[in-house]
Image (cartoon, helix red, strand yellow):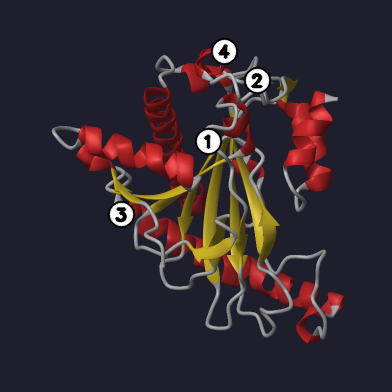
Amino acid sequence: MMNFPIISLERLNGVERKDTMAKIKDACENWGFFELVNHGIPHDLMDTLERLTKEHYRKCMEQRFKELVSSKGLDAVQTEVKDMDWESTFHVRHLPESNISELPDLSDEYRKVMKEFSLRLEKLAEELLDLLCENLGLEKGYLKKAFYGSRGPTFGTKVANYPQCPNPELVKGLRAHTDAGGIILLFQDDKVSGLQLLKDDEWIDVPPMRHSIVVNLGDQLEVITNGKYKSVEHRVIAQTNGTRMSIASFYNPGSDAVIYPAPELLEKETEEKTNVYPKFVFEEYMKIYAALKFQAKEPRFEALKA
């Protein structure tokens, strides 16, 4: 098992800063994923959010999921299912404006806790983007500005549960893909595993760790860094030993943000590396992504060059 990068943010202050920044750099260049501990989000807030998410699934989502599975005949499949995922989800938008008050079935406590958690995650995402800027030699705030658009970035959360599955070898929890957006912060179940990333043509487990936040880079950071940092294919394997909780928050460009490789990084490129990523409006990318999410990312970039 390769050593999955686990990074403690408290080491940023003091003598170990240089070492921590080097670990973040290595994770971004060679993994596209890392796991954060000592990230500053209170553990009791995470525990409450986990409890409320699991209660909400049992009360409001579980029966619906069972009915869906049985209506599609997924519980008795004999051959691999390639066009569906074994997951139960709902989405919350936080920025540019929140829709949390409009979502049905959420208790007042759940709304309140989700709101507080998302504010802390938004702050953490922006802090991480500045650490990436520092490692890339970009001015502080460059990436946040690149995501801005006319109304600021978009930020939202996908709450997913991956129920126990009778045929995990035939139905994926979530099929392999890269994430379309900017930087993704995931609070995942620490008991039921299932998240895997592709590294050197091998699927590697992202270890479930209590109170950690898993970070991964999306397609837009690959474009802005002109491929120095890459978004990485990942998937969820459905499990037979319980339901896995996943709360993934996506800090993405605004829909009208114009995305292109940072000029400073292009100047530093060596002459033999002439591959320059395209310039486009984020919304245009999302239209292509919606149709091609579960396919290789390179044709998406090529389509925008054309």
Callout 4: 10 Å neighbours few (<14), some, many (20+)?
few
In the image, taking residue 56 as reference, residue 131 lies left or right, namely left
**How far is disc 2 from disc 3 in space, using C-alphas?**
37 Å
Q: Quadrant of residue 77?
A: bottom right
Quarter that holds the N terminus: bottom left
Callout 2: 10 Å neighbours few (<14), some, many (20+)?
many
- Which residue is drawn at the image coordinates 80% and 86% (left, top)? 76
- Which residue is drawn at the image coordinates 82% and 81% (left, top)? 79
The reply to whether discs 4 and 3 touch (Cβ–Cβ < 8 Å) is: no
Of residues 166 and 98, the one drawn nearer to the viewer in this rendering: 166
Front position among marks 4 and 2: 4
- Residue carrying label 4: 263
Front position among marks 2 and 3: 2
Q: Amino acid at mark 3?
A: His
- Residue carrying label 1: 229
**How far is disc 1 from disc 2 in space, using C-alphas?**
14 Å
**How far is disc 3 from disc 1 in space, using C-alphas?**
30 Å
Q: Amino acid at mark 2?
A: Tyr
